[in-house]
Amino acid sequence: MKKFSFRRYLVCFLLIGSILMVIACGSNPKIHGAAESVDSWEAAKQYLEEGNKRFVENKGITRNTNKADRDILKGGQKPFAVIVTCADSRVAPEIYFDQKLGDIFVIRNAGNIADATVLGSIEYAVEHLHAKLVVVVGHSSCGAVTGAFGSDGHFPRDLQTIITTISSNITGSGDLDEAINNNINGTVNRIKENHIVQEEGATVIGALYNIVSGEVTFLQ
């Protein structure tokens, strides 16, 4: 009887220890350090995936290192990824990827297109900051893509340049969701063609942010 009780207590002790270990690991997510270099696109993508998971689960990191991060970053930046995304106020990548100062190099415009200014910014990020990953993040219910897909109206001159670019990406799309995905892929392909991106060996992938669920789905 005593022998049985000892084994039972031992099993319970090991089980409790395992649970506490899981809890401890979950409460200490791997966070990118402001001075940390990330040498592979796979590691960069993992940071983004883990950050988005925290965001969706309302388990975001505690940002209590702002002063320390500023002190480190005043000497330079080492963002681990470039994010090209829409200017829509609902889709701030620092928030939905749960990142801090200096973590991601963000480029935003209506419709997440890759015009000359965007490509120039990417060139700087991959050549001088050595970012290994470029992610084009479109989002559900994108107003810019909706304008290009479902409207025959006329737009102000500068806005029309955006609509025209998106229109070239979404030719043949059957519905808005397909158009949004095709626009992401069109931007990805244009960035991949950039000679600096190719020379530096940066990986370029697409992703879709769901404004309802908060989830980011990587498309490649």
Image (tube, rainbow, N blue to C red):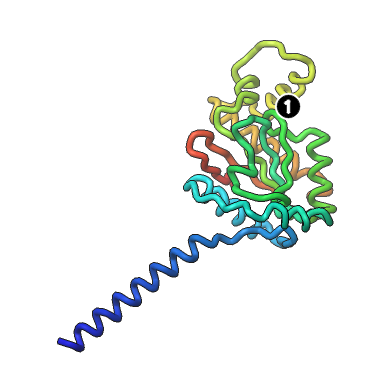
Work out whether 172 lies above or below 154.
Answer: below
Work out whether 89 lies above or below 188.
Answer: above
Asked if residue 146 lies left or right of residue 127, the reply is left
The crowding category of the residue bearing disc 1, from other C-alpha atoms within 10 Å (few below 14, some 14 to 19, many at least 20), is some
Asked if residue 40 lies left or right of residue 76, the reply is left
Give 2 or 164, whichever is nearer the viewer. Answer: 2
Provide residue 12's location: percent of width, then percent of height: 29, 75
Give 147 or 64, whichever is nearer the viewer. Answer: 64
Q: Residue at x 76, y 53 (%)?
A: 70
Identify the residue at the far bottom of this view.
3
Give 84 or 19, whichever is nearer the viewer. Answer: 19
Image quadrant holding the N terminus, namely bottom left
Q: Residue at x 57, y 53 (%)?
A: 61
Residue position for label 1: 165
Work out whether 65 lies above or below 178.
Answer: below
Total labels drawn? 1
Quarter assignment of residue 36: bottom right
Q: Residue at x 35, y 76 (%)?
A: 14
What amino acid type should be assigned to the residue bearing mark 1?
Thr
Quarter assignment of residue 217: top right
Asked if residue 216 lies left or right of residue 154, the reply is left
Provide residue 15's location: percent of width, then percent of height: 34, 72
User: Is residue 201 at least partly visible in the picture?
Assistant: no
Provide residue 18's location: percent of width, then percent of height: 39, 71
User: Is residue 191 at least partly visible in the picture?
Assistant: yes
Work out whether 206 lies above or below 151.
Answer: below
Secondary structure of the residue carrying numbered label 1: helix
Identify the residue at the far left of this view.
1
Provide residue 214's location: percent of width, then percent of height: 52, 40
Identify the residue at the far top of this view.
153
